[in-house]
Image: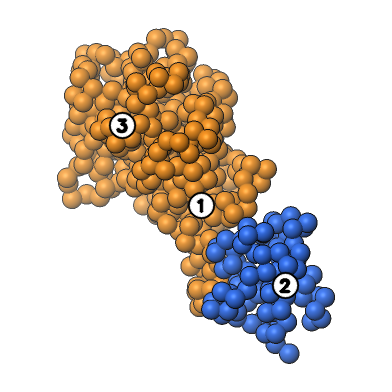
Amino acid sequence: MGIWSCIGQDLQTVTENLKQGRSGIIFDPERVKYGLHCGLIGNVPRPNLKPLLERRFRVNMQELSEYAYMASKEALEMAKISSDYRKQKDIGIIFGSGCSSVGFDAMCDVMRNEKDSLMVGPSAIFQGDASHVTMNLATIFGLRGINMSVGAACASSNHAIGIGTMFIRSGMQEMVLVGGAMETSPINAVGEDAIEALSLNNDKPQQACRPFDKKRDGLIPSGGAAALILEEYEHAIARGATIYGEIAGYGFSSNGTETIAAPDSESEYRAMANALRDAHMKPEQIDLINPHAASTQIGDREEAIAIKKLFGVHHPWVTSTKSMTGHEGWAAGACETVYSLLMMQHGFVAPTINLEHMDECAEGLRLPRKTEQTTINAFLNHSTGLGGTSSALIIKKI
Amino acid sequence: MTREEIEQRVNRFFIETLEFEESVIMPDAYLKEDLGMTSVDVVEMRLHIYKHLGFQPQKKDMMNIRTVRDVYDYIEQHLPK
């Protein structure tokens, strides 16, 4: 696995920052000048790809594919999947992500001003496509299997992992590089700002994201990327790969209601219950839930209802890593899967920071205010997205 | 613009924009085989000429440009007087 996030750009740093409960959120005045009401953002550094990639690769990339490249590079190196190995095997790639809105916006600007498509240049098509990330990474890494991007709003990359799992289970792929990538560019946050989904706590960036706290006032946009290598078990054993967890269950649902923006506890319950059923597991076998919990009033409330309904008297740890990272959008599911895998690997539950006055809706949830040392044998990672999509993954120790 | 100036500008485009090694940019070098130029790079070159040299290279003309010298010659012939 690999990670490029606002709380670290390698697994070791991210692990430490999760343990310490460090926030990666900053206030960027340029975002307010741009016209956003929310000036908060996950502080994700742009990697310098010049020493790593030839120009012919770099020129088609934008922020989110750069992050995805760095996370995937770490994942491939960790899994000991060399360039030569990739030429021999039909390894797939499925990422939850979208187009580069910066690239698309630049193309539109040129067309409005110049009224001549030649002036747009050759990279616009590769930056403005919804499969921007996977078309770039598949080319760079020479991947020869399934090659596609998944669009399901903020649940995109959790679904990407689930769909990758289905390819492995079906026997159609032995290995798939899965993940998610998200840009931090202000243009990407315009729509969410317009529907007042974002926090306005500009004065206290590191305290702004407060899942399940009474004073939560909206999500904090963020970005980054995470990548994981999914591999068929016997295949992984045969080549001596280190296995960090088994994807035991994938569940999903759609609200089926007429409201495009409202979360729905019943639907979220079904997604998580479906994942348990798929995993042949019982609620008491889940030690940790990494919920969607983006720090919105209604979103956290509906999810708390769903969790309590499903887990009843069992009280797994529930911790929102978004309290530290903000909402990594298309990348959220993959990033949070990596955060949860790190917690499982190192035996701790990261705190849900900024939880000062727990909302009544969260009473009964086992929310950690400080880092808890504990054994995690299985966790559930839950993501939801606009349009009523929900995705739940259950991953357990081997 | 003199022939020498054209050659300097073209070479600078190859080195600075397309990041080719200076040592491979010889008049008889083939764009595809020796420089490794792709179809996307050719579009970039057309755009560069259009933006900076004041005329619009035609797509069909690009088919006949195979070497670095061909680029020099093409620009010299089509540059607005």
Where is residue A166? Give x, y as percent: 27, 34
Asked if A335 appears above or below A128 in the picture, the reply is above
Residue type at numbered disc 3: Ile
The secondary element bearing badge 1 is classed as helix
Give residue A246's quadrant in the image: top left
Label 1 sits on residue = A186
Label 3 sits on residue = A168
Where is residue A25? Give x, y as percent: 54, 36
Q: Estimate the spatial distance between the alpha carbons at disc 2 and disc 1, rounded to whole Å.
A: 45 Å
Please give the chain letter of the residue carrying mark 3.
Answer: A
Residue situated in front as seen by the camera: A371 or A356 = A371
Label 2 sits on residue = B69
Q: Nearer the viewer, mark 1 or mark 3?
A: 3
The colour of chain B is blue
Q: Earlier in the sequence, mark 1 or mark 3?
A: 3
Please give the chain letter of the residue carrying mark 2.
Answer: B
> In the rendering, which numbered label is found on residue A315?
none
Asked if A147 appears above or below B14 in the picture, the reply is above
The secondary element bearing badge 2 is classed as helix
Q: Estimate the spatial distance between the alpha carbons at disc 2 and disc 3, rounded to whole Å.
A: 52 Å
- Other residues around mark 3 within 10 Å, as few (<14) / some (14–19) / many (≥20): some
Q: Which chain is orange?
A: A
Q: Name which residue lies at 72% across and 75% down.
A: B72
Question: Can I make out residue A156 in this image?
Answer: yes
Where is residue A51? Give x, y as percent: 68, 43
Q: Quadrant of the C terminus of chain A?
A: top left
